[in-house]
Image (spheres, rainbow, N blue to C red):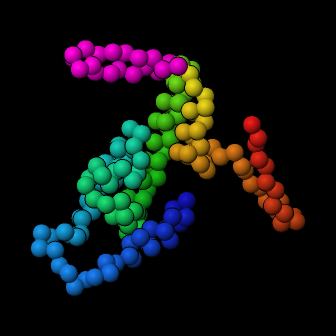
Amino acid sequence: MVKKNTKKVKKLVKKKSPNKSVKNPKGAGRKPTYKKEYCDMVTSHMEKGFSFASFAGAIKVCRATVYSWTVKYPEFMEAKERGRERELYYWEQVYNRAALGNNTIKEKQPDGTVKVRELKPNAALIIFAMKNKFPTMWRDQQEEKDTDDNVKITYERRG
């Protein structure tokens, strides 16, 4: 899984500004400094249900920067993978509670009171969300290869 995205990330990293002669006097374009503590930070960020890409916003760098760190720093890539598993766990818990109707939301009202709302089960929402958030595990289409004849067999679930 680590090798899969490496080519895309390297393309993002290699993109350069078309006009290098123009310098920004305010220091824009400063190289963000990678810190080892980002490994723990990214896993704790993702275990709350946030995406890896949103971690860039949390530490105030661009998305391409955090993806380039996954190529340069193997420990950061491992932390991202651990975070992805924790993110999956978080969302499966949320969807499980929603499917069973055991999910409540606390909303703070303008007058300072807290209103508690219970969410009703919504299977379509859960299926849609899981297919989009984790497509390799939740897609409708699954592929298998027959090793004897090298025939590709595709199964498709229809509603």
Name of the residue lying farthest toward the right: 149
Query: Image height check: is 103 above or below 1?
Result: above
Comparing 71 with 116, the one in front is 116
Q: Is residue 131 magenta?
A: no
Left or right, 116 with respect to 148, comes to: left
Which residue reaches farthest bottom? 21
- Residue in the image at 65% along x and 46% along y: 139
User: Within the magenta stretch, is there residue 106?
Assistant: yes
Question: Magenta segment, principal secondary structure?
Answer: strand
Q: Quadrant of the N terminus?
A: bottom right
Going 25% across and 55% down the picture, which residue do you hit? 60
Q: Residue at x 50, y 30 (%)?
A: 93
Q: In the displayed structure, would residue 127 be above or below residue 8?
A: above
Give the quarter of the image for residue 14. Answer: bottom left
Could you tell me if residue 73 is visible in this image? no
Query: Which percent across, then down, holds residue 83?
Result: 43, 47
Quarter of the picture holding the C terminus: top right
Vertical arrangement, residue 109 with respect to residue 131, above or below? above
Q: For the magenta stretch, what is the residue range?
A: 102-120
Left or right of 154, for residue 12: left
